Image (spheres, rainbow, N blue to C red):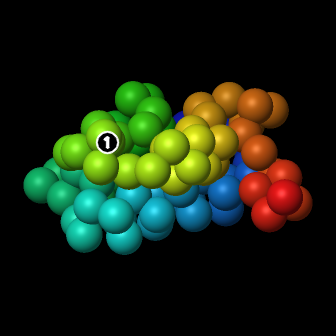
Amino acid sequence: VKGQPYGPKVDIWSFGIVAIEMVEKDVPYWNESPRSAQLLIATKGIPQLRQPKHLSPLLRDFLSCCLQREEARRWSARELLQ
């Protein structure tokens, strides 16, 4: 989206977004065009959750680890599995 090279941690980000889709039963920024949605996710970070208090602390932490905007701070698959 930003025109920068990416590595395996982009898949971790995508996994976090898919987890949000599963929890919310909806795609983040569904009312936007696909390109606009990509840009919003890339620039605004984690999409606003509708009812974050309904999520367990473990799931909130998991999403936070997956959806770090800075790739260096985003957890690896190995770290997520521990």
SS label for mark 1: helix
Describe residue 6's horizontal placement relative to residue 37 as left or right.
Answer: right
- Above/below status of 72 relative to 66: above
Q: Residues within 10 Å of mark 1 (few under 14, many from 20)?
A: few
Across and down, in percent, residue 33 comes to: 21, 56
State which quadrant residue 45 falls in.
top left
State which quadrant residue 52 falls in.
top left
Number of numbered discs on residues: 1
* Residue 82 makes an appearance in the image: yes
Across and down, in percent, residue 70 comes to: 68, 29
Residue drawn at the location 27% of the way across and 61% of the way down: 24
Describe residue 31's horizontal placement relative to residue 67 as left or right.
Answer: left
* Residue 39 makes an appearance in the image: no
| 65 or 28, nearer to the observer | 65
Across and down, in percent, residue 75 comes to: 77, 45
Which quadrant is home to the C terminus? Answer: bottom right
Across and down, in percent, residue 9 comes to: 74, 52
Residue drawn at the location 67% of the way across and 57% of the way down: 12
- Above/below status of 9 relative to 81: above
- Above/below status of 44 relative to 19: above
Q: Check disc 1 and give the amino acid type.
A: Pro
- Above/below status of 43 relative to 78: above
Describe residue 75's horizontal placement relative to residue 36 as left or right.
Answer: right
Residue drawn at the location 39% of the way across and 58% of the way down: 20
Residue drawn at the location 76% of the way across and 56% of the way down: 80
| 61 or 25, nearer to the observer | 61
Describe residue 26's horizontal placement relative to residue 40 as left or right.
Answer: left
Residue at image mark 1: 52
